[in-house]
Amino acid sequence: MGAGIARENDNLFNVKTEFLNVYRTCPGLVPTKRGERLIVNVITKMRYFQKPTPEQVRIALIYLRDWLVHNNIYEWTMPEFSCGRDQLNYKTLIDLMAEVFANTGMNIHMYHWNSINVTKPKEPQSNLCAPCNLAVVENLKTLPVSVENVMVNWGNIVADGLTPEQLRKDQILDDDIMPIMVAVQEGKRPDFQDIVGFSNKTRTLWHQFKSLIIRDGLLFRKFVHIPREPEKDQYQLVLPSKHVKNTVKHYHEQLGEVNHFGIHKTVPHMQRFFWWPGMQNDIQWCLYNCLVCNRFKGVKHRVPPPMKIFQDGVLHGRWHVDIAGPFQASEEGYTYILFAVEAFSGWPVVVPLRGERSTEVAKDLVTHVFSVFGSPISMMTDQGKNMLSETMREVANLYQIKKYKISVKHPQANGKVKTWIKTLKLQLALLIEDNPLTWPDYLPFIAQAYRSLPNEVTKCSPYEIMFGAPMRTPLHMERGAPPCQDDWSHHKTAYPMFVREALTKIHDIVRESKMQSAKRMIQLYDKTAMLSPFKGIIGDMVYYYKKNTQRGVMRKLTSPWLGPFTVTDIINDCNAQIQDDAPPYTKMIVHIDKLAAYTPQDSECDLVTAAWLTFI
């Protein structure tokens, strides 16, 4: 324990050597001197994890009192109470202080500082006193108050730079508190009709009238514990409205207090000291406006852009292409599968590959797709090297195909072929359990089954959409030949017209079915998209989602939300230009699902005190 205190003293006062050279007893005192500053450490335990008893603390305080009287010191400064690891009750400490220092006539100053890292000394700062590093702490020191004023009970508070007289004045000047405070002083509860015209907060105070009490000129609320334990009853200061925001902010952000915990932790903690009408709503609003909480945990999801209907108007208009694998090498040496799905009909083409080189992929596309079905209008692929190669670009130029590539972060844009890959993998797993090396032999039969089955939306199979009639399979042939159609053999010129009309009718049905399905899908999807507070308006403040990939940075302890940024331009329905609000004011174009609405910080309240001293 001596080494730990010595390190902390060295960090604060540069008196490590002096401290270690002093013989230490428990309970006991270790006075050291640095310049004109006299530092007295009160020893209540010898090891860090020990828990001192109240009697040990009492004896240590008596030693301190006698030492102060002996050295004629009647005005001194002490830090705020901290009972975390020692597990001492605040009320016990206060009772001990009141018992030991009663009738001594001493003036005790109390100060509050942020937690100090004793394992790694802080770098010197320009605004700190070089010899002792305590200039800022001295500035936060409270005005001298007597022991009786400080230690009434564990519900008392002392504000930095704010005297009890100022608090009393603020309560009287508060329009919500003043009418009830006057009634409590007079000891007579007003009729409800007399306060109907006042605010909701005043009426809430009226309902709490029996729990309100005036102590030292301040209005408190008595908080009774259930089950009834009188020794645990607390007196909560009724906080004036002008101090609410800054008080909540301080307790929420102060290291060692609430540490940016949520509403369920912050409210019970603050209720130990304060109460005011609408307390939970006010705390919730302050936490909602916390910039740090918003960046690390407030942004629950990214913004989905509104869905657009992409109509597949014609047959062979667009093909989706992808490669799956590697699979276990077959007896012929196949390890990959080339997938191509026609968007309008859902017709699948499945080709086994020995490799995924661009030349092999391009050759099989030409052989099994373009030479069979003709040149499509467009083709959609991912951003694999084989799909973006020079060979694939030359093939697309040769067949006059407009080539699209999906975003790496949005593979769902190629969902038609991705869904097919998932289905085929499942079918292969069911069929090749006994002989996994023969998986290429099953590909044609899986593709045939898929082509013959009706789609859930269109009610037509890919084969029927492609050729205008249902596919004839061995199962159909077992049931006999289909009913005889009209004899078209004598009408060779009319038969093509009949087929064209049949295909046109089927395609119209497919288009209508797909349109209705797309409308239902977009209606469900946009319910989530429209719930986002981000509306994509130029000038909006937003957060930007970017995972940290820098070396040496712990991603789990770093917020992925950066900002705030300002939206400077809306490029299209999916992309926006944003600008950093901090130098060098970088601009970038990002997808809007990486943006989330920024909650502006409320800065309207001008408060008297910058922080509250956490106290008993």
Image: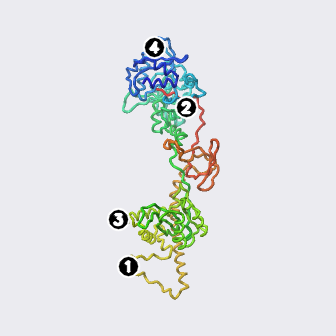
Three-letter amino acid code at the position of disc 4: Trp
Give the CA distance from mark 1 to mark 3.
Answer: 31 Å
4 or 3: tag closer to the N-terminus = 4
Q: Position of residue 355 (x, y in %)?
A: 49, 63
Q: Position of residue 216 (x, y in %)?
A: 50, 22
Q: Is residue 362 visible?
A: yes
Position of residue 496 relative to residue 106, above or below, is below
2 or 3: tag closer to the N-terminus = 2
Q: Which residue is mark 4?
A: 67
Q: Position of residue 3 (x, y in %)?
A: 44, 24
Position of residue 179 relative to residue 546, above or below, is above
Q: Which residue is mark 3?
A: 434
Which of the 4 quarters of the picture holds residue 328?
A: bottom left
Choose between 182 and 460: the one closer to the eye.
Answer: 460
SS label for mark 4: helix
Give the CA distance from mark 4 to mark 3.
Answer: 90 Å
Q: Which residue is mark 2?
A: 243
4 or 1: tag closer to the N-terminus = 4
